Image: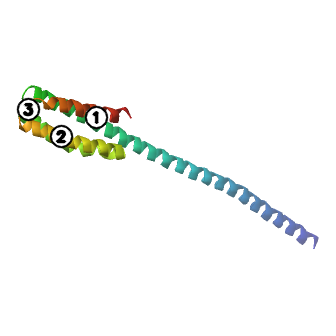
Amino acid sequence: MNTFRAILIAVLTLLVGFAGGYYWELQKVRELEGQIKGLMVEMENSSRASKEQLAKAEAQKEVYKLKALIAEVRSDVMERNFGRADEKMEALEASLEKAFGPLGDKGIEVRDNLKMSLEAVREGIKKLDVKVKTKLDEMSKVLDPVLEK
């Protein structure tokens, strides 16, 4: 009976030891899983912020392109090359949505103001009016606050 008791105590001790070790390692695994989940959330937030920054940077790049197109149109008007100025006006109109879409409400407001100005400039170009250069200068100045943000 003593040997049976000793074997039973040894088996129970081994079982308790295995269960304790399993539980201890399980706690470490759970802790690591929690850290992994935290890092995943942090990574997603960082990725989302990076995507937003990238979208804004691309929008700013498009606004700079708009400024360059406006300068080209102004140059063409100054050279009295109204045909080329009209072609560039089409490119300018096509670029508006691409430039101001990601900038939100403020961008939409500026875009709508520019669309109205573009129509006036286009009318002036059709009339071969050199005075549209002042309107083009105003359009370029409207873009400056958008670029500062």
Given residues 111 and 32, the one toward you in this image is: 111
Identify the residue under disc 1: 142
Task: Say above or below: 64 vs 7.
Answer: above
Residue at horizontal 74 percent and vertical 57 percent from the top: 21
* For residue 104, side relative to residue 139 (left or right): right
Q: What residue appears at the point 68 percent right and 53 percent down from the top-left corner?
A: 28
Q: Residue at x 27, y 31 (%)?
A: 141
Could you tell me residue 94's position as x and y percent? 19, 44
Q: CA separation, marks 3 and 2?
A: 14 Å
User: Dividing the image into 4 quarters, which one contains the C terminus?
Assistant: top left
Q: Considering only vertical position in the picture, is 25 above or below 2?
A: above
Q: Specify which label sits upstream in the sequence, 3 or 2.
A: 2
Q: Please provide percent x and percent y for residue 85.
A: 11, 34
**Residue 40, percent from left and from top:** 53, 50
Instruction: Identify residue type, mark 3.
Output: Asp
Q: Nearer the viewer, residue 85 or 59?
A: 85
